[in-house]
Amino acid sequence: MTEASSGVRERPLSPHLQVWRWHVTMLGSILHRACLVGLYVGALILVGWAVALASGHDAYLAYSGILASPIGKLVLFGLTFALFFTVASNVRHLMWDTGRGFTPKIADMITIAGIAFALVATIVVWVIAGQTGALS
């Protein structure tokens, strides 16, 4: 019979970011997950808004004041980006579900297009909001 060693057995390490070469699709994947977490936070902010609305005029004004602060606007800007990027990322995943777009060149291109779409759409929404007085 063979004897089992009593020491800790050396196991191979999983590939890590230091091993893999950085790709834009990795950025897209990480950004997609971060945006989903951000949208969960956005859902909590929306619930807080609804609670403040149901709690009366003073509570609503206080909550609206928090959202209208510079930090509040930054959070809402980030949530707008998260929403648009998640839409773009889901379209990308839908395309991949059909078996298309897996070549590195196409995958990189549609990931960059998704990030660009989210950024441009976010800026357009905020510029329109600013011009209509919604940010005042």
Image (cartoon, rainbow, N blue to C red):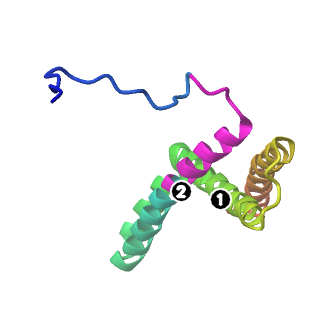
Tell me the quadrant of the picture where the C terminus can be found: bottom right
Q: Nearer the viewer, residue 122 or 85?
A: 85
Q: Residue at x 54, y 56 (%)?
A: 36
Q: Looking at the rendered structure, which numbered label has been put on residue 48?
A: none
Q: Is residue 43 above or below residue 14?
A: below
Label 1–label 2 contact, CB within 8 A: yes
Looking at the rendered structure, the secondary structure element under dot 1 is helix
- Give the magenta-colored segment's residue range: 19-37
Q: At label 1, which amino acid type do we have?
A: Thr
Q: Nearer the viewer, residue 82 or 74?
A: 82
Q: Is residue 75 above or below residue 52?
A: above
Looking at the rendered structure, the secondary structure element under dot 2 is helix
Q: Residue at x 52, y 59 (%)?
A: 39
Magenta highlight on residue 32: yes
Q: Nearer the viewer, residue 109 or 6?
A: 6
Measure the alpha-carbon separation of dots 1 and 2.
7 Å
Q: Looking at the rendered structure, which numbered label has been put on residue 36?
A: 2
Tell me the quadrant of the picture where the N terminus can be found: top left
Q: Residue at x 64, y 57 (%)?
A: 80
Q: Is residue 11 above or below residue 52?
A: above
Q: Mark 1 vs mark 2: which is more N-terminal?
A: 2
Percent coordinates x, y for residue 105 in the rendering: 86, 41
Residue at the spot of label 1: 86
> Is residue 12 found left or right of 117 in the rendered image?
left
Magenta highlight on residue 87: no
